Amino acid sequence: MAFSQSIKRAQVPKSCELCETDTNIKWKCVQCNTLMCEKCKKIHLKVQTSIKHHIVDVKSSETKTEMEHTTITDNIPCQIHERKLNCMFCRTCNHLVCPECITDSHKKHDLDSIDKVCNEKKRELKELESKFSDTFTLCKIEDSKVNDFKTKYKQFFAESVQKINQQEKLIIDEVRKYAKVLREQLESEKQRIEKSITEKEKNIAEVKENLLNNQSNIQEILDSNQAAKVFSTYPEFNEKEIPNASFKAFPEETKDFFPTKENLKTISNLFGSLQKY
């Protein structure tokens, strides 16, 4: 978005952002995000600190895509030597180093280019993002199972209550007192199952939120195209554990109502009881 806005501003008579006089703007520095004229472009590429910068034609249809996929890996200040810029990545110490750092304490260390290491870590971040995405998909599957489970037992308990009511109509008032006891037992069983369902839904919701936050944070880092952000946040995400989306299955065992088919002496035998289903 910022790039397209810069292009629109360039179409209106505007001075070069370096010399501030020439309005014939033709080029843009990817690293500096600066619009410039032909003369300033040549000067910019001769300056020692910007000699390796990437200059693109502002009118090219490929410019926007090219800039979106370019990670800015130079002009990263050294945290130890503030006036120096990092030029390499020390694999031995696992951090960026400037020329003075290398001279002071990294001479025999395993050094590599910032671009190469940054691309490696970006690939690893993408793999982590993929894992978060896969786990989130598993959470959605578990969520679907919970909904099916809830529907199943809602119907199951409704049918049990209906059978109790039908049996109740066939017997005398004394038996109705016993039916009340059975309803209370069934309600207690129902509350136990509903509590289990509620806990399951809460657990899945928390895991889903965690996964979405991590995906969003990683995507923000990748979209920023800033190597500094990649290096500063990579250890945090690399050490994070991806939540387990597989949870223990619900207990299938509960109680059902079975009417008594024989005329026996006790009320429970006459009316029926809750039994393992």
Image: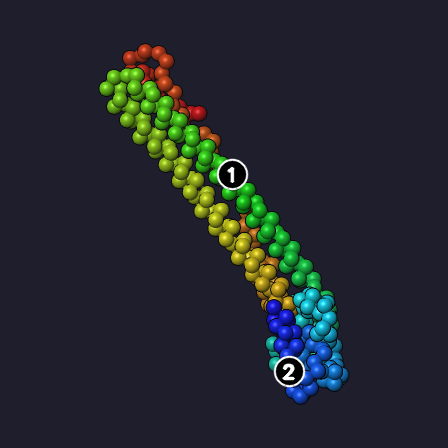
Q: In this view, does 257 lie to the left or right of 112?
A: left
Determine the secondary structure under disc 2. loop
Residue 145 marker? 1
Q: Position of residue 222 (x, y in %)?
A: 62, 63
Give the answer, above or below, for where 75 lies relative to 124.
below
Residue lying at 70% horizontally and 80% vertically, measured from the top left: 25
Residue lying at 64% horizontally and 79% vertically, measured from the top left: 12
- Which residue extends farthest top? 263
Label 2, residues with CA under 10 Å away: few <14, some 14-19, many ≥20: some
Quadrant including the N terminus: bottom right
Q: Position of residue 177 (x, y in %)?
A: 25, 23
Q: In this view, does 69 lie to the left or right of 264?
A: right
Quadrant including the C terminus: top left
Nearest to N terminus: mark 2 or mark 1: 2
Q: How far apart are labels 2 and 1 at the CA level?
A: 61 Å
Residue bearing mark 2: 14
Give the answer, above or below, for where 125 lies relative to 22.
above
